[in-house]
Amino acid sequence: DDMDEISIDGQVVIRLCLLGLKFSAFGTLIACVLIPVYASTSETDDGILRFSMTNVHPDSEDYVFWLIVVGAYLLVFNFFWLIRAEWRHFIKLRQTHFLRRALGKNGMASAQAQFSLMVEKLPSKYQDSRSVLSLFSQIFPRQVFSAVSQRDTLLFYHLRALKKTSDTIVVCKCCQGCVHRQLEKTVQFERK
């Protein structure tokens, strides 16, 4: 399947374009019925206005108004039917996507991310990996593979922010060590 090579976001965009095409095609069929009706009720308008609803006068035949109302309702019902069909397709697409990730067909890192969970602000007695593993093993028996505790993330966030800014700032290797040492001092100061 060529669609398996495209990401789920790309597939949704393609399906959205197809939905617009289907709705436009149905609207064209409705227009093929309504435009001659609009043109036949023409009395004064010329040009493009002759083929629009503005050309219909209040004293026109009753069937003209009923055709317009039926055409509008058909367009609305067609749109809802198309949206419902696309929603069902999206549900199947999402389930297939999650299954492919869980089976590792999109890579092992993707499969691991599918089943990973990040928990923040744990009580101090659950700050080490063994305690976290035992806690979640009690909650979810035989379903927890491993637990890794990241106790102090302040330095991590500062390093990440520094990495983002250092991509735009040119620093030589000798100065980069000084920057990291200064960052560690800043983190120690913030902890106090």
Image (spheres, rainbow, N blue to C red):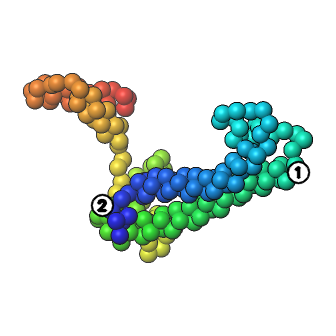
Q: Secondary structure at mark 2?
A: helix
Q: Inspect the image, locate mark 1, and give the three-letter code of the amino acid beneath it.
A: Asp
Identify the residue position indicated by label 1 in the image: 62
Camera-nearest label, 1 or 2:
1
In-front residue for pair 123/93: 93
* Residue 168 shows in this picture: yes
Quadrant where the C terminus lies?
A: top left
Label 1: which secondary element: helix
The mark nearer the N terminus, 1 or 2, is 1
Q: Residue at x 30, y 26 (%)?
A: 186
Residue 148 percent coordinates (x, y): 34, 57
65 or 4, nearer to the observer: 65
Q: Position of residue 77 (x, y in %)?
A: 71, 58
Can you give x and y, in whole percent of width and height, for residue 19 in the image?
54, 56
x 72%, y 57%: residue:
74
Q: Where is mark 2, residue-wise?
A: 109
Residue sticking out furthest to the bottom: 142
Residue 162 in which image quadrant: top left
Residue 186 higher or lower than 54, as above or below: above
> Relative to residue 66, is residue 187 drawn left or right?
left
Q: In the displayed structure, would residue 128 be above or below residue 39?
A: below
Amino acid type, callout 2? Ala
- Quadrant (top left/top right/bottom left/bottom right) for the N terminus: bottom left
